[in-house]
Image (spheres, coloured by chain):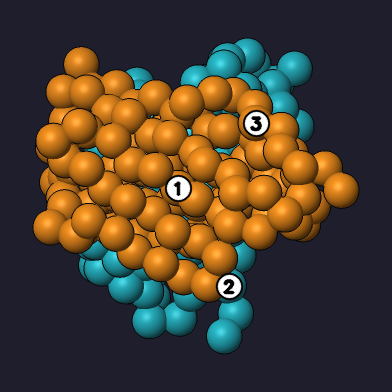
C-alpha cells in the first residue's frame, strides 16, 4: 500500500541554523509534491509545490528538492527563526485532487 | 480576498446522532476537498468535489457523505456518529487539480 514517511516526529534546532525535513514515499508515483505548515488549532498553510519533472524549488528562505529515483523530498529552512516553529507536512498527489499526507514533523527552533 | 470559511468551529454530539459541516471556499475556487485529522491517523482524505460532482473519494465508510452546491459551497454529513469520529474536519479549496490547496481552520467535532 502507499506509504509516506516524514523523517521524525520532532526536530529541535538552534536559531540561525538550517532545518532539513525529509519526506520518503513508497508504492507511489506522485505527479507533484507539496509542503504545508500547520500551527496548533489552525488549518495547514501551503508553502511550496514541486512537480515530478522539477528537481528543486525555492521561495525566500525555503527550498524543496524532489528525487523521484530515491522517492524522497527534502525541505530546507535556512537561517531558521523561532517563528518557524510549527508542524510541517508533506503531501503527494498522482490522480489529481486526492492529496495523501505524511504524519508531519514538529519543528522547534530555540533562540 | 476572504479565505476558506468553515462553520461551526466547534461541535459536540452524542453517539448515534448525525452532523452537517459547512465550507465556503475562496471565491473562484471550484475544487473543494475534505479531510479528517486525528492524532493517531494524521490528515486523511475524505472526498473532493468539483462543479458539484464528487471526483475522488477516500477510504471512509458510507456514513460519511458530502455535496457541493452551484456556488461551490460544500457540506459534509456524518450519520450515526461513533466515538471514533471525534476529530478536526478540514476543508480545502483550490482553483483546479495540481494547484495548492487553501485550508480553513476546521471544525472540531467531539462525540460523547
Up/down of B27 relative to A34, above or below: below
Q: Colour of chain A?
A: orange
Q: Position of residue A59 (x, y in %)?
A: 46, 70
Q: How crowded is the residue under tag 1: few (<14 C-alpha within 10 Å), some, or many (20+)?
A: many
Residue at 19% across, 60% down: A54
| Residue placed most toward the observer, B100 or B63 | B100
- Report which quarter residue B58 is drawn in: top left
Up/down of A44 relative to B62, above or below: below
> Is label 2 or label 3 in front?
3
| Separation (CA) of disc 2 from disc 3 | 30 Å
Q: How crowded is the residue under tag 3: few (<14 C-alpha within 10 Å), some, or many (20+)?
A: some
Tell me the tag on residue A60.
Answer: none
Marks 2 & 3 on one chain: no
Chain that is cyan in the image: B
Q: In the visual, does B79 lie left or right of B15?
A: left
Marks 1 & 2 on one chain: no
Instruction: Answer whether labels 1 and 3 touch (C-beta < 8 Å).
Output: no
The residue under label 1 is A75
Q: Position of residue B59 (x, y in %)?
A: 30, 25
The residue under label 3 is A11
The residue under label 2 is B3
Residue at 77% across, 50% down: A15
| Separation (CA) of disc 1 from disc 2 | 26 Å
Residue A60 visible in the shown view: yes
Residue at 32% across, 51% down: A65
Residue A40 visible in the shown view: no
Amino acid at each position: 500500500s502507499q506509504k509516506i514517511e516524514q523523517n521524525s516526529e520532532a526536530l529541535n534546532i538552534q536559531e540561525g541554523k538550517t532545518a532539513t525535513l525529509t519526506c520518503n514515499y513508497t508504492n507511489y508515483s506522485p505527479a507533484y509534491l507539496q509542503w504545508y505548515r500547520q500551527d496548533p488549532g489552525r488549518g495547514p498553510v501551503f508553502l511550496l509545490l514541486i512537480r515530478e519533472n522539477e528537481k528543486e524549488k525555492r521561495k525566500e528562505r525555503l527550498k524543496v528538492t524532489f528525487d523521484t529515483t530515491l522517492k524522497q523530498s527534502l525541505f530546507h529552512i535556512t537561517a531558521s527563526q523561532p517563528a518557524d516553529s510549527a508542524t510541517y507536512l508533506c503531501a503527494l498527489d498522482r490522480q489529481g485532487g486526492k492529496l495523501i499526507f505524511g504524519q508531519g514533523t514538529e519543528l522547534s527552533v530555540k533562540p | 480576498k476572504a479565505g476558506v470559511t468553515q462553520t461551526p468551529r466547534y461541535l459536540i454530539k452524542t453517539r448515534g446522532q448525525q452532523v452537517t459541516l459547512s465550507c465556503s471556499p475562496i471565491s473562484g475556487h471550484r475544487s473543494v476537498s475534505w479531510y479528517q485529522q486525528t492524532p493517531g491517523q494524521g490528515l486523511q482524505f475524505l472526498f473532493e468535489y468539483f462543479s458539484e460532482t464528487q471526483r475522488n473519494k477516500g477510504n471512509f465508510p458510507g456514513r460519511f457523505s458530502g455535496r457541493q452546491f452551484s456556488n461551490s459551497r460544500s457540506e459534509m454529513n456524518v450519520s450515526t456518529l461513533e466515538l471514533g469520529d471525534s476529530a478536526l474536519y478540514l476543508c480545502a479549496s483550490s482553483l483546479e487539480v495540481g494547484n495548492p490547496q487553501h485550508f480553513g481552520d476546521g471544525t472540531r467535532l467531539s462525540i460523547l
